[in-house]
Amino acid sequence: MGAFVYVADDKIEKGPAKQIADEAVVISTKDYDTLLAFVKEKNIGGIMTGPGEFNIVNAMIVSKLAGLPFYCDKDQWDLCQNKRNFKDFCKRNSLPVVPEYTVDDVLTHNDFPVIVKPVDGCSSRGITVCHDQEEYEKARMTAVGASRSQQIIVEKYIDNGGITIDAKYVAIDGKCYLEAIGDRYVMKDSLITAVSIYPSKYLNAFLEQVDPFVEKAFSSIGLRNGAFFFQAIPDGDKIYIYEMGLRVSGGMIYKMTEATSGNNSLKMLVHYSATGQMCEEADIEKIDAGFKGQVASTLAIPLKAGKIASFGGFDAVCQYPGVIDFTRYYGNGDEILPRHLNTLDQLFGRIMVTADSEESLWRILNNIRETVTVRDDKGEEMIQWSTFDYLYSRFLSKNKE
């Protein structure tokens, strides 16, 4: 985008971001006074960070101290990050939410299964699905332990075969635009997404039940610019929102929208931080949740517990037609511990694919599945493909009918 980029954190060694920065700086992102002095000294025009909550708050604070634009303020952030506050916000604004119980409710056999979450957790940590009272008691302790405020929320668990909806929005001068919506298929007995497919087969239902209330809801808290996403779950013909993030997602769907529709919400946020304006009118016209007739997917690479000894095939699949991105989180010698399972730390990486049809998309995904490998120090395969294999076989069966 033509900007000179400084990257600051408290690490002397250069991580990935510092390696590609114009200049790397050793200043803690929590050291507001030193950062502010650096911003003034270098005449820096904008402050931005990625999807990590800790650094978003720090960037927000330093931007305010420096008099620089930032897409949201602390009150807006706290409302959207806290599951309790967010759920109450949805109810006030006619946004449909999952039925819930209070922690004082006495649950009966007919109430199960339920899902228990910390009100201020992230990355799927501290979340448990409970099928009986014994699991519920343990889950409450787990959720409290994962919550900074030691508060939890208990909701009806909707068992729909493991599908959730991911909806991405961008706010520009008070208007809210749905830029992407996909179906996420989670691993069996897990909350981790194995495969996501865009656009969602629930696009029209979402446009009817949720979208009409979004703009007014965020106008009520003064949010005029920024990016945010909803996570929702279909239950029969109804859609319930259960969570949101006032940020771009770690799944980097902005790369998918840029490859299909031509808009990139992360670039918009960078532009806003430097100029106070999200984009030009021509950029707004590119936004299309239908991806201009194309389809896309993110294929996750979930691992079982163990120590990574080797991996292969990923360089090859990056050359496949339609593969637009591969993000790897681990390397040889890294270990997936039991505590990483059922959190995003379980993923070796993500591969993003676009195609002109659903059939060609699944063909590319299956070619990737047959090519890549991650093996542990015993020579055993670590990638867990069972969910993908089930979905792919279901796709093949549907096409034969």
Image: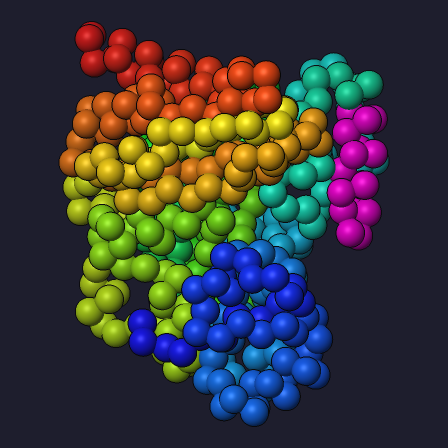
220 relative position to 113: left or right = left
Foreground residue, 59 or 87? Answer: 59
Q: How many marks?
A: 0
Image quarter for residue 20? bottom left
Q: Nearer the viewer, residue 160 or 64?
A: 64
In the image, the segment drawn in magenta is 136-153
**Quadrant of residue 92 within the rendered picture:** bottom right
Residue depicted at x 56% and y 45%: 243
Q: How is the image coloured?
A: rainbow
Q: Position of residue 73 (x, y in %)?
A: 58, 72
Taking the image as shown, residue 129 lies to the left or right of residue 182, namely right
Please tell me whether residue 39 belongs to the stretch shown in magenta: no
Most foreground residue, 237 or 357: 357
Indicate the quadrant containing the N terminus: top left, top right, bottom left or bottom right. Answer: bottom left
Q: Is residue 348 above or below residue 286?
A: above
Residue 150 within the segment the image draws in magenta? yes
The quadrant the C terminus occupies is top left
Query: Residue at coordinates 43% horizontally, 24% vertically from top-left?
Result: 373
Residue 254 visible somewhere in the drawing: yes
Q: Residue at x 29, y 38 (%)?
A: 318
Q: Position of residue 226 (x, y in %)?
A: 44, 66
Q: Tell me if residue 9 comes above or below residue 88 in the rendering.
A: below
Q: Is residue 233 visible?
A: no
Residue at x-position 37% and y-position 77%: 3
Residue 351 place in picture, x, y as percent: 37, 37
Vertically, is 369 above or below 104? above
| Image quadrant assignment for residue 294 | top left
